[in-house]
């Protein structure tokens, strides 16, 4: 499917079953649900793209910024953008072996994950020290007096102790172990199932942990464990976006969904940072005080991208993932751009849209007051495609020229 399209039961070539629709309706119950809205006998997707896996149904939602309906083109484009902003590691050695054109986005993640786990197995799974408590017939480690009294009052020959063991049972492996079992539970990517089962043979049984984002935030990788980074990143995406069916367990949902507005913003930002002139700086999402109430409560504005030269702003960009075929931006977008420019010394400001062609439309904001300086503002339409984009090169060139278009 493409973003903003709808999927119904018993209508057209692509149908939802009643059971699948019910699972999507139950999944929708969360507050401020962003992925899709409910319509009569179906769902309508929003500006989020990625994959929804419900039971035996996989729905791939792709971006679309022009009239082309070529799914492979937009799938490859989405993958390129995800790689560009780091949702997929572009420098991971296992990426070269992925058959991306034949795979769905979900299969791509699952193949990358198992490839990373297999790499860890080949290098040797690391061991860590951990403390355990147990009853022993020999005293070693620390005697836990309170538990010794309660548990061994009639077994004087035993000692309830705490001691250290050095093995492969630790948090990193618990996360990878759970992620692999979760993927097998989903029953997806049958061509990878044997690889997952084989990898699990190298892992000792791990205790079951309850996954929360705080667990990943607490992980501090060292030089010894740095190789686990990519596998943990993908495990985090899978586990935090897995929603088990608590009723009968048959309609589990996996939602690997990404905000297309965020992807477009990060894609333009990273692309500029990689190609900008060495004397210029590109920064994203810098907040500036905009309004303050009497109680000191403040409102802030935050332009998507600020281009600076010698730490002085020279251009402001605001990215919008919209298809404006007539080349006319909305009033709200222009007002937002005007405020950004005013708060950055009236530098040129541009709305950056995806488009079917590379195009720059120049403009000037009318003077609000007699002593106002002219405020240049316009829009850029960037033609994007898989691989390197001529449109992005156009944008780079305009920035290098300091956006002196007036």
Image (cartoon, grey):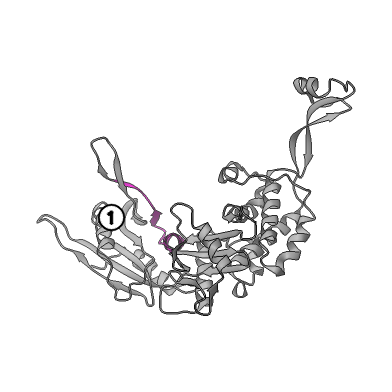
Q: Examine the structure image and report whether residue 22 is included in the region drawn in magenta.
A: no
Front in this rendered view, residue 318 or 23: 23
Q: Is residue 73 above or below residue 137?
A: below
Total numbered labels = 1
326 on left or right of 200: left
Characterize the local packing of mark 1: few (<14), some (14-19) or many (20 or more) Cα atoms within 10 angstroms: many
173 on left or right of 405: right
Give the residue drawn at x 57%, y 52%.
240
Residue 381 rendering spot, x and y as whole percentages: 35, 71
Give the residue drawn at x 28%, y 59%.
337
Residue 133 rendering spot, x and y as whole percentages: 77, 31
Give the SS element for disc 1: helix
Q: Is residue 12 above or below residue 221?
A: below
Give the residue drawn at x 9%, y 56%.
370
* Snapshot quadrant of residue 166: top right
Location of the C terminus (image quadrant): bottom left
Which region shows up in magenta?
261-289
Q: Examine the structure image and report whether residue 284 is included in the region drawn in magenta.
A: yes
Q: Is residue 83 visible?
A: no
310 on left or right of 53: left
* Snapshot quadrant of residue 152: top right
Residue 191 rendering spot, x and y as whole percentages: 71, 70
Give the residue drawn at x 74%, y 37%.
129
Front in this rendered view, residue 76 or 343: 76
Q: Is residue 127 above or below residue 120?
A: above
Q: Is residue 292 visible?
A: yes
The residue furthest left is: 370
Give the labeled residue for mark 1: 340
């Amino acid at each position: 499917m493409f973003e903003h399209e709808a999927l119904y039961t018993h209508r057209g070539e692509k149908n939802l079953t009643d059971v699948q629709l019910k699972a999507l309706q139950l999944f929708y119950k969360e507050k401020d649900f962003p992925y899709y809205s409910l319509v009569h006998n179906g769902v309508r997707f929003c500006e989020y793209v990625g994959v929804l896996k419900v039971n035996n149904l996989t729905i791939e939602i792709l971006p679309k910024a022009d009239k082309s309906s070529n799914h492979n083109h937009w799938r490859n484009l989405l993958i390129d953008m995800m790689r560009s902003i780091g949702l997929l590691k572009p420098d991971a050695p296992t990426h070269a072996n992925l058959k991306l054109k034949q795979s769905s986005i979900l299969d791509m993640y699952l193949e990358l994950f198992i490839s990373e786990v297999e790499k860890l197995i080949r290098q040797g799974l690391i061991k860590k020290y951990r403390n355990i408590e147990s009853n022993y017939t020999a005293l070693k480690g620390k005697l836990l007096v309170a538990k010794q009294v309660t548990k061994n009052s009639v077994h004087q020959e035993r000692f309830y102790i705490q001691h250290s063991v050095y093995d492969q049972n630790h948090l990193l492996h618990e996360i990878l172990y759970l992620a692999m079992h979760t993927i097998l539970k989903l029953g997806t990517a049958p061509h990878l199932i044997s690889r997952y089962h084989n990898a699990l043979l190298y892992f000792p049984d791990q205790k079951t942990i309850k996954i929360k984002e705080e667990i990943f935030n607490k992980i501090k990788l060292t030089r010894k464990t740095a190789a686990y980074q990519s596998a943990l990143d993908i495990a985090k995406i899978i586990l935090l976006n897995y929603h088990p069916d608590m009723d009968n367990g048959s309609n589990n949902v996996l939602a690997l969904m990404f905000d297309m507005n965020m992807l477009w913003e990060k894609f333009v930002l990273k692309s500029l940072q990689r190609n900008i002139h060495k004397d210029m700086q590109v920064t994203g999402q810098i907040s500036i005080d905009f309004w303050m109430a009497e109680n000191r409560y403040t409102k802030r504005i935050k332009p998507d991208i600020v281009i600076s030269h010698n730490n002085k702003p020279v251009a402001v960009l605001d990215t919008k993932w919209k298809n404006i075929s007539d080349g006319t931006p909305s009033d709200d977008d222009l007002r937002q751009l005007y405020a950004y420019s005013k708060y950055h010394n009236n530098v040129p400001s541009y709305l950056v849209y995806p488009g079917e062609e590379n195009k720059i439309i120049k403009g000037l904001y009318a003077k609000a007051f007699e002593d106002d300086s002219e405020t240049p503002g316009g829009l850029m339409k960037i033609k994007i495609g898989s691989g390197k984009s001529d449109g992005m090169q156009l944008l780079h060139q305009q920035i290098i020229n300091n956006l002196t278009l007036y």
